């Protein structure tokens, strides 16, 4: 679900680690909707920027207008603006569209050291954009460039408190908030500047501003890594996303700093130079599309052969063509009746484990459907001369006991969805089997097949509706699971399906 609209006005990074490409990944990872207005195309990778192709300011303006006039915007984030004409065009557009929240990453120098903002654009940036900024996010070299352009002398950083001095000075240039990023100046744990690589222990980002002009220090452990390509772009886009979702500034910045830290720590290590971050470290991607968990489950390479052995078992096919020995079917009816007793208990347990009335009612409806099936089993047995007392007093066979107690054990020891997965082979399988036999031209129908009433029972509207209800609930809950949990559930499904096959084997040998 999209929770905020963010327009990024920045340059493209052909290697995907910074610029618009990184911005879109970050915004998507935060659950927001990303739009883009491209200021420049770059030929770059992790080792450097090889060329820049500027987009004409007039065309840039058309991109901005197209996005805001149609979709609208909650936050605008700017990155690489490259030229004075571009800065002018952006400032005019933001004024005319009355954009309220603006995050400016004053991209001047790439991580690789390449110059990305023309010197003549600095003054225009200070004059036209900084006063409109909700937050400005310079790193230490960028902060010093901005201050030098404004006439400040060199401000040293010997201790953490010196970052506040710099942030306060940049704040005086107009933005409501300033975040001076401290990655270029690691500190010792005591807050003094590290003199050697061995002394680098912490990084401090200094947030300054707001109505009270307060300072907030965000401290993270120093990580010795080459994977910092696009950290500035990523941090600013994370802040923009958090603001779009309604966070206040200190929370938005702190959360963004934690996000980037994790992205650095889990970076994939790509490229020969400064590698990109892992932008999706906090987002897992499920291996199926929403609404298609059951399809994915049955089509998996480790499930499909087992599922096929279940729904196309010789016992099943023999019911369709009426070649199944009657004694085998009688044995099946009795054991399946005993199985359904435990199946009803398991569904009652699922109702107990459910967290809302809709799911409680769904499990209760399945119990009612099971009761109907049990009555039909007794009716079938009566037709074959087997009284109800004999059915109820027949001992469970080992395969029946093993299967039902496995399902109940899953229900007792695990959560609601694990129990539903353990029940799924039976619920889904009987519907699939009956539909296959019902539609198979080789199946004997009507009075020519004593098993035809059984087949019709599982293609009836009430059973089809029960299967749909069960599938809908599985689809809903599957989306809430992690990939690791999905793998655990698949193992339960496989085991339960194998026990269904053991059921057919038991009846085949009766």
Image (cartoon, grey):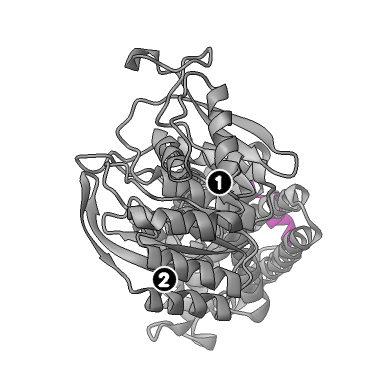
Q: Quadrant of the N terminus?
A: bottom right
What residue is pinned by disc 2? 318
* Camera sees residue 117: no
Q: Estimate the x, y position of residue 196 in percent, counting from the top left.
A: 34, 14
Count the marks: how many? 2
Helix, strand or loop under label 1: helix
Q: Estimate the x, y position of residue 235 in percent, counting from the top left.
A: 48, 45
Q: Estimate the x, y position of residue 479 in percent, counting from the top left.
A: 56, 57
32 vs 51, nearest the viewer: 51
Q: Are marks 1 and 2 in contact (CB under 8 Å)?
A: no
- Magenta span: chief secondary structure: helix
Q: Quadrant of residue 465?
A: bottom right
Q: Is residue 317 above or below residue 160?
A: below
- 116 magenta-colored: no
Give, as a single range, the part of the protein colored magenta. Answer: 388-395
Q: Quadrant of residue 269?
A: top left
Report the residue at 57% width, 80% height from top.
Answer: 69
Report the residue at 27% width, 41% height from top.
Answer: 113
Name the mark on residue 403: 1
Q: Is residue 234 above or below residue 84?
A: above
Q: Nearer the viewer, mark 1 or mark 2?
A: 1
Report the residue at 50% width, 49% height from top.
Answer: 236
- 391 magenta-colored: yes
Disc 1 versus disc 2: distance between alpha carbons? Answer: 23 Å
């Amino acid at each position: 679900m999209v929770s905020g609209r963010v327009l990024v006005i920045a340059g493209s990074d052909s290697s995907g680690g910074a610029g618009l490409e990184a911005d879109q990944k970050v915004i998507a990872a935060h659950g927001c909707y990303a739009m883009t207005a491209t200021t420049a195309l770059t030929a770059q990778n992790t080792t450097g920027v090889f060329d820049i192709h500027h987009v004409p300011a007039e065309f840039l303006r058309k991109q901005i207008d197209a996005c805001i006039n149609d979709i609208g915007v909650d936050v605008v984030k700017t990155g690489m603006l490259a030229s004075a004409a571009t800065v002018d065009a952006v400032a005019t557009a933001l004024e005319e569209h009355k954009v309220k929240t603006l995050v400016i990453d004053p991209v001047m120098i790439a991580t690789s050291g390449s110059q990305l903002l023309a010197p003549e654009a600095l003054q225009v940036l200070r004059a036209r954009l900084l006063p409109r900024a909700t937050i400005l996010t310079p790193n230490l070299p960028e902060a010093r460039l901005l201050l030098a352009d404004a006439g400040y002398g060199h401000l040293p950083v010997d201790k953490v408190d010196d970052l506040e001095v710099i942030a306060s000075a940049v704040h005086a240039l107009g933005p409501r908030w300033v975040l001076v990023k401290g990655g270029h100046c690691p500190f010792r744990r005591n807050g003094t500047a590290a003199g050697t690589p061995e002394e680098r222990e912490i990084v401090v980002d200094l947030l300054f501003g707001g109505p009270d002009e307060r300072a907030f220090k965000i401290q993270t452990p120093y990580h010795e890594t080459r994977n910092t390509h696009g950290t500035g772009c990523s941090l600013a886009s994370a802040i923009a996303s958090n603001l779009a979702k309604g966070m206040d500034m200190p929370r938005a910045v702190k959360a963004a700093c934690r996000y980037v830290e994790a992205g650095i720590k889990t970076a994939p290590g790509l490229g020969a130079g400064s590698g990109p971050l892992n932008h999706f470290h906090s987002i897992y991607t499920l291996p199926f599309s929403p609404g298609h968990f059951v399809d994915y489950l049955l089509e998996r390479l480790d499930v499909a052969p087992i599922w096929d052995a279940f729904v196309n078992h010789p016992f099943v096919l023999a019911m369709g063509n009426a070649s199944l020995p009657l004694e085998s079917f009688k044995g099946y009816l009795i054991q399946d009746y005993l199985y359904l007793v435990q199946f009803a208990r398991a569904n009652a347990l699922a109702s107990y484990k459910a967290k809302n009335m809709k799911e409680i009612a769904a499990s209760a409806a399945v119990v009612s459907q099971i009761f109907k099936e049990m009555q039909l089993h007794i009716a079938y047995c009566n037709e074959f001369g087997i009284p109800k007392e004999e059915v109820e007093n027949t001992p469970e066979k080992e395969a029946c006991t093993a299967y039902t107690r496995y399902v109940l054990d899953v229900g007792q020891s695990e959560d609601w969805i694990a129990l539903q997965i353990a029940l799924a082979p039976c619920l889904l399988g009987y519907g699939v089997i009956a539909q296959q036999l019902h539609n198979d031209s080789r199946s004997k129908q009507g009075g020519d097949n004593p098993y035809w009433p059984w087949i019709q029972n599982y293609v009836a509207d009430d059973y089809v509706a029960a299967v749909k209800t069960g599938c809908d609930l599985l689809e809903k809950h599957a989306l809430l699971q992690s990939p690791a949990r999905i793998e655990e559930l698949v193992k339960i499904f496989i085991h339960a399906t194998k026990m269904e096959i053991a059921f057919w084997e038991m009846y085949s040998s009766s």
